Amino acid sequence: MDYAPIGDMNDLLRLVAERAPKDAAQAIDVDAARLARAIKHSRHTRVGFLPATPHTNVQGTAATVGRALTLLTEQLVLVLDPERTTAPRESPVGSTAEALFAAPLAPGLVRMVPFAPAPTGAKVESIRFLLHFAESDPEAWGQVLIDLSGCSLPGELLGVLRLVDAIVVVGTAGITTEADLKAAAKRVPAELAMGVLLVEG
């Protein structure tokens, strides 16, 4: 996946227009489509995805839900990867610490990553940085889907709670146990809980 540096929302919109994959003919998982519909009707704009275990594919899940959302809302959907799990280890030469990178995943769907993942204990700052960019032009997009994989420490998740409208717990079918799901769900306040989504491994 090729990431490009972006300086403002105009750069991002130009990137989506010029480089978004043209073939969007992909099957959408039924459960992901159901969640996308729930997000649309809830009017939540900032939704976090919290993995029940460290090995859950949160980025793949967010991308699948994002594709369904773009079809339902016909608006731009942003997928945030604060941990840079989908990006090269090395940032492009000449990049600055303030740089932000993006890669279109499908028409109307783009993933954004920071210059570098935040160190342990400072994950909230990385998420806040990406959200600050998105909220510089909130009319340009419909939803932001946020990977909360890096928020393993209790304090980190507490810091994120003020930044999101809802949180979905994500598990892997056949691998994630009921105990894992319950433990993750307990970390989410009732007013932010938007259920559990099990995905294929």
Image (tube, grey):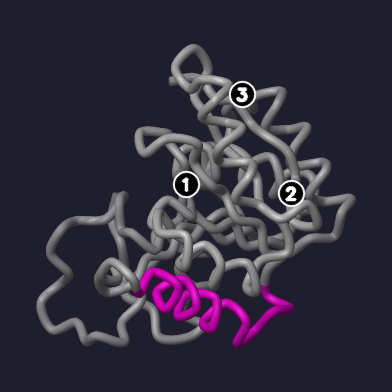
Whichever of labels 3 and 2 marks the residue nearer the N terminus, that label is 3
Residue 120 placement (x, y as % from top left):
28, 66
Residue 119 placement (x, y as % from top left):
25, 70
- 1 or 2: mark nearer the eye: 2
Looking at the picture, tell me which residue is in the foreground, 147 or 6: 147
Q: CA distance from mark 1 to mark 3?
A: 15 Å
- The quadrant of the image that shows the C terminus is top left
In the picture of the structure, the residue carrying the numbered disc 1 is: 21
In the rendered image of this protein, does residue 22 appear above or below residue 148? above
Residue 12 placement (x, y as % from top left):
49, 73
Residue at 35%, 76% in the rendered image: 100
In the picture of the structure, the residue carrying the numbered disc 3 is: 27
Residue 28 in the figure: left or right of residue 114: right
Whichever of labels 1 and 2 marks the residue nearer the N terminus, that label is 1
Residue at 40%, 59% in the rendered image: 153
In the picture of the structure, the residue carrying the numbered disc 2 is: 193
Looking at the picture, tell me which residue is in the foreground, 194 or 21: 194
What residue span does the magenta drawing correspond to? Answer: 122-140
Q: Secondary structure at mark 3?
A: loop
- 3 or 2: mark nearer the eye: 2
Amino acid under disc 1: Pro
